[in-house]
């Protein structure tokens, strides 16, 4: 044979070595007896066949794909191989490496003429049978194929088949034709070859594998199944199964493409010839063909394995449920989902449908692709998702606002119109931060006066912040990183005003007032009765879970309530989402579960369906560390529509691919199920801000990873607007991009002028900086030269339920009959949780002129619809919001203004707010530290 590296040299041959001697190392050689076997000379072909010559071939990319195993290597000849191929219905046949036979309908894998077919056939030394990586190819040129119903067999004397130890119920079912017409085996599951195979051993192995049919073929091959497939049929004579078993020469174990079949089925199941699944498909799916795939670089990004139930209906229904409009089945049990763009990006090509002939694991009457081949389908007609990609003013705009002295962990908008920031200890590279600052947005042009230094005593790392409904709108920060920080309850009483200096500072004393148990990563919420519910967390510093709830201020005699569901789902349930429900009860979502708690006992009242995650991984989660973001859909008078909770983004275990969907649920509706809406991109560690026009801004985060230091990568720089007034699956618009990566520990809050303040990013990762810069995102409603409306509160800022608010307004875009009114409750933002955030559109009526509009607003009816809270009231003039003004609705029913009653804490007291004419007598010095 010619050498691969130099065709002019000889490098041995079939069973021959070219031997060389160094320095006469071989002293004497035995006499070489010249072989009497003639060298191959025959280059013709049997009648009806035409030789195509020598072609290249490869183990990993066969020129002819179907290998024939029924001819022993020592019996291989051109005639034997061609005879088997033509019986199978193939027009192409090839012989290789002296002993291998291949069949097919076409030349594959760029097979092309080559040299090197110099090996003699094992069964006829006068004929060429290819070479190493070389195949002699023949083409059947006759006008019709010979009949295949009764294959020609060699006349032999068949030994008596002696089978004496069959399992109970098993009987012989005859000799069956295998791989007829080039189809796959009639029994799909081929066990490893066994040189000592017997009928009994094959049957026992099939029973152990859970099958009810066993087949023996060609003395060493054992096949199992529960039905005969691929147009299996009995051979014309039992004598065609004439190969003795490898382990018992007195038993017959099939033959060349013949199978001795046994079963415990009385009437053995024989399935019809499989077909392509292109009828009765779910939805608007259509079959497109057999698509090439690559096991190293998959065409579609999402793979789900269905070991026993992969069908076109199951696979495609899953894809469309999660918003993917392209996909299909591969290798019997694999379901792929993605987009048509994936096919374009990978230059995937369609091949002949006859390549995709593996049976579906859940429907053996249909095909589910093949090795690296996908039965490919596309969703047609109405798209599953419609995203708008905005430009210009419609895309909004990011703007740099100011540099900062702090890398914030939490941000809270105070009722004094300023933003307070808290930072974990040690965040600053210089370690010179006090851990607390306040920003006055009216003084942005002067760094020194815009930022006010404040102080905390213990570490707020991974704590929770909310605004209290007391008379002064105090902010409380709960929990922390390590003892005594984890017990921490920190209070700040906002004072001053925009442009007017503030003086108050944070107050805390864990020896006087604190949690009953330390908590790191807890959630907090003001309940309908005005008390504060604190949920979950860990002991601190990646410690043990704290699977419990507690109420503050602590009711007399009350302890903590153990929650098995928080213990069971640790560590994936941190910073759970909490919502007061209009019908009573408390919604809680943690990891990938949700339930409703009784608001009095805090015991589980109702289990809700598990929260969907990724199309290929139901174990994905929505709370820290697989951090997404939750919001409550706007509530509108008369508040009769079911409340809707929505959670966007999150991540998955393993490769930690971020989720690309939002899911929503009406938890109070009987039998409610989660609705899935796909986002334009994947997102984890995101923030989501409710806007006064009823929309939501989704920003920050990454495309991959978890929440935590150095655990996320590939920043998501795009802003997305979610508009719940639009039809499902067309509610999201891609807006402007930022240039700043906002990774772990990012925040976003709505500020009174309608912009969104964006801060933070503390990844402690050399790939992304510790982020001191503060940005604002300007929504489209403030662009295009619009003028914001002005309004005045005419009857104070403190209101009860079902109360009346009167305002006078000046409009610039419309008139009294185009006005909308919204209430945006106070928010503390950290870790994808916007504690307290809700949107309300109350009942109102307006009259007058654009220059003098008079409106009467009715506040929400009760504390379950609207838990006691401060809120910014906005007037929207043809969609353009005013500057928000703070009002309190629902009072302070838990009398938080009298707590904590220690000399070193400010006590606002109870009663009307200052804006409602109430006088406030502070209980102590508000700057005591």
Image (cartoon, rainbow, N blue to C red):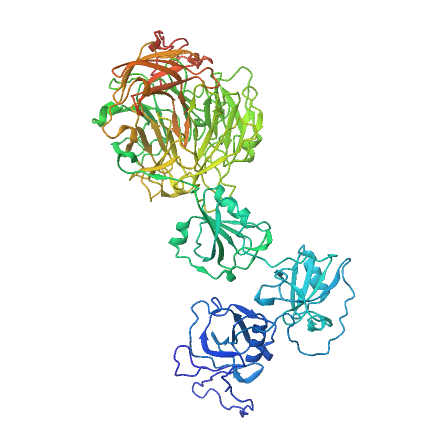
Q: Check the image and report above or below for 58 versus 779.
A: below
Q: How many marks?
A: 0
Query: Does residue 158 appear left or right of residue 452 in this picture?
Result: right
The residue lying at 57 percent from left, 26 percent from top is: 604
Q: Nearer the viewer, residue 55 or 35?
A: 55
Q: Check the image and report above or below for 910 versus 52.
A: above
Residue 174 visible, this angle:
yes
Q: Check the image and report above or below for 326 versus 624.
A: below
The residue lying at 49 percent from left, 84 percent from top is: 43
- The percent coordinates of residue 266 (x first, y second) are 75, 57
Q: Residue reaching furthest left? A: 445
Q: Nearer the viewer, residue 127 or 837?
A: 127
Image quadrant in which you'd find residue 716? top left
Query: Does residue 453 appear left or right of residue 519 in this picture?
Result: left
- The percent coordinates of residue 104 (x first, y second) are 52, 69
Quarter occupied by the C terminus: top left
Query: Does residue 279 appear left or right of residue 916 in this picture?
Result: right
- The percent coordinates of residue 410 (x first, y second) are 37, 29
Residue 772 visible, this angle:
no
Q: Nearer the viewer, residue 68 or 526?
A: 68
- The percent coordinates of residue 691 (x first, y second) are 35, 27
Image quadrant in which you'd find residue 602? top right
Q: Residue reaching furthest front? A: 143
Query: Does residue 644 appear left or right of residue 736 in this picture?
Result: right
């Amino acid at each position: 044979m010619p050498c691969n590296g130099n065709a002019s040299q000889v490098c041995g041959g079939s069973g021959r070595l070219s031997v060389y001697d160094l320095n006469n190392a071989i002293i004497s050689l035995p006499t070489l007896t010249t072989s009497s076997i003639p060298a191959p000379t025959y280059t013709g072909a049997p009648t009806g066949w035409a030789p195509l010559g020598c072609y290249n071939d490869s183990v990993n990319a066969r020129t002819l794909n179907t290998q024939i195993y029924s001819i022993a290597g020592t019996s291989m000849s051109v005639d034997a191989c061609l005879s088997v191929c033509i019986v199978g219905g193939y027009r192409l046949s090839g012989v290789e490496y002296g002993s291998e036979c291949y069949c097919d309908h076409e030349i594959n894998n760029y097979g092309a003429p080559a040299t090197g077919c110099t090996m003699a056939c094992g069964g006829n030394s006068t004929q060429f049978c290819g070479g190493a990586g070389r195949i002699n190819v023949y083409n059947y040129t006759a006008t019709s194929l010979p009949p295949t119903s009764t294959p020609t067999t060699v006349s032999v004397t068949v030994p008596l088949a002696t089978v004496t130890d069959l399992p109970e119920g098993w009987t012989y079912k005859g000799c069956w034709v295998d791989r007829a017409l080039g189809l796959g085996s009639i029994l799909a599951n081929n066990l490893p070859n066994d040189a000592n195979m017997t009928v009994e051993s094959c049957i026992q192995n099939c029973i152990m594998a859970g099958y009810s049919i066993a087949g023996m073929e060609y003395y060493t091959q054992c096949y199992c199944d529960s039905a005969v497939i691929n147009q299996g049929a009995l051979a014309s004579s039992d004598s065609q199964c004439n190969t003795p078993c490898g382990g018992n020469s007195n038993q017959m174990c099939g033959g060349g493409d013949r199978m001795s079949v046994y079963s415990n089925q009385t009437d053995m199941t024989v399935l019809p010839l499989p077909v392509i699944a292109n009828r009765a498909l779910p939805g608007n799916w259509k079959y497109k063909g057999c698509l090439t795939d690559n096991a190293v670089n998959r065409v579609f990004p999402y793979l789900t394995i269905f070991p026993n139930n992969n069908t076109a209906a199951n696979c495609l229904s899953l894809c469309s449920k999660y918003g993917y409009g392209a996909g299909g089945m591969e290798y019997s049990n694999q379901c792929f989902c993605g987009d048509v763009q994936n096919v374009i990006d990978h230059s995937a090509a369609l091949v002949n449908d006859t390549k995709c002939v593996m049976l579906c694991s859940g429907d053996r009457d249909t095909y589910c692709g093949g090795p690296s081949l996908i039965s490919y389908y596309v969703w047609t007609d109405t798209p599953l998702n419609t995203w708008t990609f905005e430009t210009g003013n419609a895309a909004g705009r990011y703007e740099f606002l100011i540099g900062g002295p702090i890398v914030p962990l939490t941000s809270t908008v105070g009722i004094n119109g300023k933003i307070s920031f808290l930072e974990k200890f040690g965040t600053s590279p210089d370690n010179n931060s006090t851990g607390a600052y306040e920003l006055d947005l009216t003084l942005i042009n002067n760094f020194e006066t815009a930022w006010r230094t404040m102080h905390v005593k213990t570490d707020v790392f991974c704590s929770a912040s909310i605004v209290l409904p007391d008379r002064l709108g105090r902010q409380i920060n709960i929990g922390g990183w390590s003892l005594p920080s984890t017990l921490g309850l920190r209070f700040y009483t906002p004072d001053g005003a925009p442009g007017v200096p503030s003086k108050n500072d944070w107050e805390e004393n864990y020896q006087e007032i604190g949690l009953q148990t330390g908590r790191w990563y807890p959630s907090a919420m003001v309940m309908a009765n005005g008390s504060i519910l604190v949920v979950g967390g860990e002991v601190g510093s990646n410690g043990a879970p704290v699977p419990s709830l507690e109420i503050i201020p602590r009711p007399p005699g009350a302890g903590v309530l153990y929650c098995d569901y928080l213990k069971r789902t640790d560590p994936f349930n941190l910073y759970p989402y909490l919502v007061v429900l209009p019908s009573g009860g408390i919604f809680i979502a943690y990891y990938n579960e949700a339930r409703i708690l009784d608001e009095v006992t805090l015991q589980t009242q109702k289990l809700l369906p598990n929260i969907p995650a990724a199309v290929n991984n139901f174990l994905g989660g929505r709370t820290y560390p697989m951090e997404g973001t939750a919001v409550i859909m706007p509530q509108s008078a008369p508040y009769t529509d079911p409340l809707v909770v929505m959670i966007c983004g999150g991540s998955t275990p393993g490769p930690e691919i971020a989720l690309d969907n939002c899911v929503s649920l009406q938890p109070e509706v009987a039998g409610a199920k989660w609705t899935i809406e796909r986002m334009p991109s994947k997102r984890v560690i995101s923030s989501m801000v409710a806007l006064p026009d009823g929309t939501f801004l989704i920003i920050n985060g990454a495309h991959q990873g978890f929440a935590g230091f150095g655990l996320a990568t590939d920043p998501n720089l795009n802003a997305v607007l979610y508009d719940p007034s639009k039809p499902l699956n067309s509610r999201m618009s891609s807006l402007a991009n930022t240039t700043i990566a906002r990774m772990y520990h990012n925040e976003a809050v709505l500020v009174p002028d309608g912009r969104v303040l964006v801060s933070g990013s503390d990844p402690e990762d050399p790939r992304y900086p510790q982020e001191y810069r503060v940005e604002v995102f300007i929504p489209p409603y403030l662009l295009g030269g619009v003028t914001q409306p002005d309004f005045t509160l005419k009857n104070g800022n403190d209101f009860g339920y079902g109360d009346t608010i009167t305002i006078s307004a000046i409009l610039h875009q419309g008139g009294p009959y185009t006005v909308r009114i919204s209430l945006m409750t106070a928010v503390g933002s950290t870790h994808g949780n916007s504690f307290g955030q809700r949107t309300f559109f109350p009942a109102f009526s307006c009259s007058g002129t654009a220059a003098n509009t008079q409106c009467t607003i009715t506040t929400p009816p009760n504390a379950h619809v609207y838990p006691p809270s401060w809120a910014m009231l906005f007037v929207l003039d043809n969609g353009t919001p005013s500057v928000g003004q703070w009002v309190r609705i629902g009072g302070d029913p838990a009398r938080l203004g009298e707590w904590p009653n220690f000399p070193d804490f400010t006590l606002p007291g109870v009663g009307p707010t200052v804006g409602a004419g109430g006088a406030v007598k502070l209980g102590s010095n508000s700057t005591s530290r």
